[in-house]
Image (tube, rainbow, N blue to C red):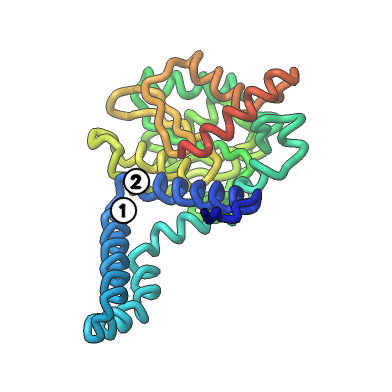
C-alpha cells in the first residue's frame, strides 16, 4: 500500500493556503466579485474536463480565452485588488504583527499621545444634543496624508469649543471630516472614501458610509454623529457601532488610545486586536 510523503512543510503549506483562501472569501463575501469568482471557477473546471476528454476545438477556444483571462480578471477585480494592496502596503498592517514594542508595551497605542478624550466626548455629546452632524477620524498608525490633503490643514489643540466651531452648520469647514493626529487637529473638511459593502443597512446616510469606508482602508477609529437622529456612533475595522452613550465612547477611546499597564491586559488586548482585525 502506498503512502504519501507528508511532512511538516506540507502541513504549513496547507494551513497557509487555507488561510489565504479564507482571507479571500472574507474580503469578497457579499460582493458581486464573489459571483464572478464562482463563474471563473466553473469555467476552469469545464476547461479541465475539456482537456481530459481531448476535445481539440473547445481546447483551442478556451486556451485563447485563458490568454486574456488574467488581464480580464485584473480589470474586473480592480477595486478589490486596489483595496487589498493598500491594506498589505499600509505600515499599520505590518505593525500589527512585527512591532515588538507594540506587542509587549502597547496594544493599540496611537500616535495621539496627548489625545484629549474628555474634550472629544463633550463635543460629541453636545453635537448629539443639538443634532449637529460630525465626523472625527483618529488613526492609530495609518498614514492619512492623502486624506488630509483633501481638506484644510490645521494645527490646533483639541477643545470642545474648537470642534463645535468647526462643525457649526454655518462654518465653511463643517462639511467633511476632522482628522486628529498626535493629539492635535491637523485637518478639517476632509473627504473620506465611501464604503462599497452591500451589507451596510440602507438607512445609513453618506456621513456614516464615509466613516465605515475610512475604517475599512485604515486602522482609524472614526466617530460620527448623526444630524438627523442625534446619535453618536463609531466605526472600526469596517464595522459600525451605533447609538453609543458618552460613557461607551469614552471607554472605547481609552481602550484604543491609552497605554496598557498590566501584562494580562496586554495579552488579552493583543489577541482581541488580532480577532477584530481578521473580522474586518
Badge count: 2
Report the side of 148 relative to 212 (left or right): right
Q: Residues within 10 Å of mark 2 (few under 14, many from 20)?
A: some
Element assignment for label 1: helix
Determine the residue positioned at 51% across, 33% down: 276
**Along the viewing direction, whichever of 251 and 237 lies nearer the viewer:** 237
88 left or right, relative to 133: right
From the top left corner, tell me how far across and down residue 215 is, in percent. Answer: 47, 41
Instruction: Identify the residue under disc 2.
Output: 29
Of mark 2 and mark 1, the one earlier in the sequence is 2
Please state if 65 lies on the left or on the right of 193 as rendered: left
Image location of residue 91, percent across then percent down: 64, 50
Q: Which residue is mark 1?
A: 34
Q: At 40% from the left edge and 31% from the top edge, which residue is drawn? A: 240
Using a 10 Å C-alpha cutoff, classify the residue at mark 1 as few (fewer than 14 neighbours), some (14 to 19) or many (20 or more).
some
Which residue is depicted at the point 43% across and 39% down? Answer: 238
Residue 52, image x and y in percent?
A: 30, 74
Amino acid at each position: 500500500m502506498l503512502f504519501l510523503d507528508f511532512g511538516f512543510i506540507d502541513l504549513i503549506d496547507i494551513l497557509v493556503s487555507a488561510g489565504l483562501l479564507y482571507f479571500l472569501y472574507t474580503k469578497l463575501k457579499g460582493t458581486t466579485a464573489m459571483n464572478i469568482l464562482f463563474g471563473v471557477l466553473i469555467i476552469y473546471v469545464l476547461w479541465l474536463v475539456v482537456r481530459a476528454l481531448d476535445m481539440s476545438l473547445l481546447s483551442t477556444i478556451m486556451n485563447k480565452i485563458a490568454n486574456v483571462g488574467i488581464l480580464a480578471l485584473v480589470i474586473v477585480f480592480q477595486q478589490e485588488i486596489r483595496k487589498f494592496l493598500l491594506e498589505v502596503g499600509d505600515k499599520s498592517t505590518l505593525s500589527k504583527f512585527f512591532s515588538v514594542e507594540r506587542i509587549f508595551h502597547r496594544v493599540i497605542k496611537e500616535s495621539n499621545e496627548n489625545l484629549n478624550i474628555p474634550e472629544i466626548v463633550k463635543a460629541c455629546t453636545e453635537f448629539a444634543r443639538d443634532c449637529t452632524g460630525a465626523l472625527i477620524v483618529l488613526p492609530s498608525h495609518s498614514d492619512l496624508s492623502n486624506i488630509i490633503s483633501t481638506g484644510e490643514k490645521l494645527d490646533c489643540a483639541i477643545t470642545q469649543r474648537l470642534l463645535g466651531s468647526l462643525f457649526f452648520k454655518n462654518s465653511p469647514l463643517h462639511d467633511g471630516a476632522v482628522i486628529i493626529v498626535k493629539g492635535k487637529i491637523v485637518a478639517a473638511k476632509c473627504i473620506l472614501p465611501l464604503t462599497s459593502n452591500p451589507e451596510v443597512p440602507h438607512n445609513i446616510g453618506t456621513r456614516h458610509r464615509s466613516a465605515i469606508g475610512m475604517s475599512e482602508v485604515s486602522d482609524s477609529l472614526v466617530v460620527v454623529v448623526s444630524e438627523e437622529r442625534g446619535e453618536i456612533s463609531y466605526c472600526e475595522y469596517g464595522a459600525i457601532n451605533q447609538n453609543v452613550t458618552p460613557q461607551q465612547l469614552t471607554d472605547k477611546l481609552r481602550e484604543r488610545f491609552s497605554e496598557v499597564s498590566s501584562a494580562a491586559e496586554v495579552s488579552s488586548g493583543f489577541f482581541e486586536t488580532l480577532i477584530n482585525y481578521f473580522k474586518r
